[in-house]
Amino acid sequence: MKTEFSERLKSALRMRHMSQRRLSEKAGLSEQAVSRYVSGGRLPNAEVLLRISKALGVSADYLIGSNLRSERSPEERFQEILIFLRGNSENLSKRQKREIIDILLDV
């Protein structure tokens, strides 16, 4: 069963070039628990969610798909954008990539 959490967790792992084993070590979790979270078979409790987000360097809000954008810092929002772009860059056309670069240069 896929969940938004599992999809975002997989994306964050890809972006960090981090294995499930490494995440389990950094977050102090068993490899089996991490595997269940990645597969969508289980959701973490609040304490574990915070340990995972800290190990990955992303906000817990990002991992659970929270829409509280106005409550996140600009740094957290920027990190989410980077994770999205890195995880989806192969799906973007050259034109779309140029448009994104132009937008960022105008900021």
Image (tube, rainbow, N blue to C red):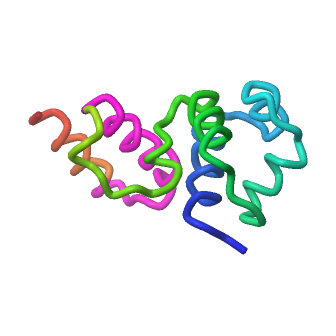
| Quarter holding residue 16 | top right
Residue 13: image x %, image y %?
A: 65, 41
- The residue drawn where x is 32% and y is 39% is 77
35 displayed left or right of 75: right
32 displayed left or right of 79: right
Q: Nearer the viewer, residue 78 or 104?
A: 78
Residue 88: image x %, image y %?
A: 48, 54
Q: Nearer the viewer, residue 66 or 23?
A: 66
Look at the image and give the residue range highlighted in magenta. Answer: 74-96
Q: How many marks?
A: 0
28 displayed left or right of 49: right
Q: Is residue 104 magenta?
A: no
- The residue drawn where x is 45% and y is 57% is 65
The main secondary structure of the magenta stretch is helix
Q: Is residue 77 magenta?
A: yes
- The residue drawn where x is 21% and y is 46% is 70
- The residue drawn where x is 83% and y is 48% is 33
Residue furthest top as drawn: 26
| Quarter holding residue 74 | top left
Residue furthest left as drawn: 106
- Relative height, residue 27 to residue 88 (above, below): above
Quadrant (top left/top right/bottom left/bottom right) for the N terminus: bottom right
Residue 80: image x %, image y %?
A: 40, 42
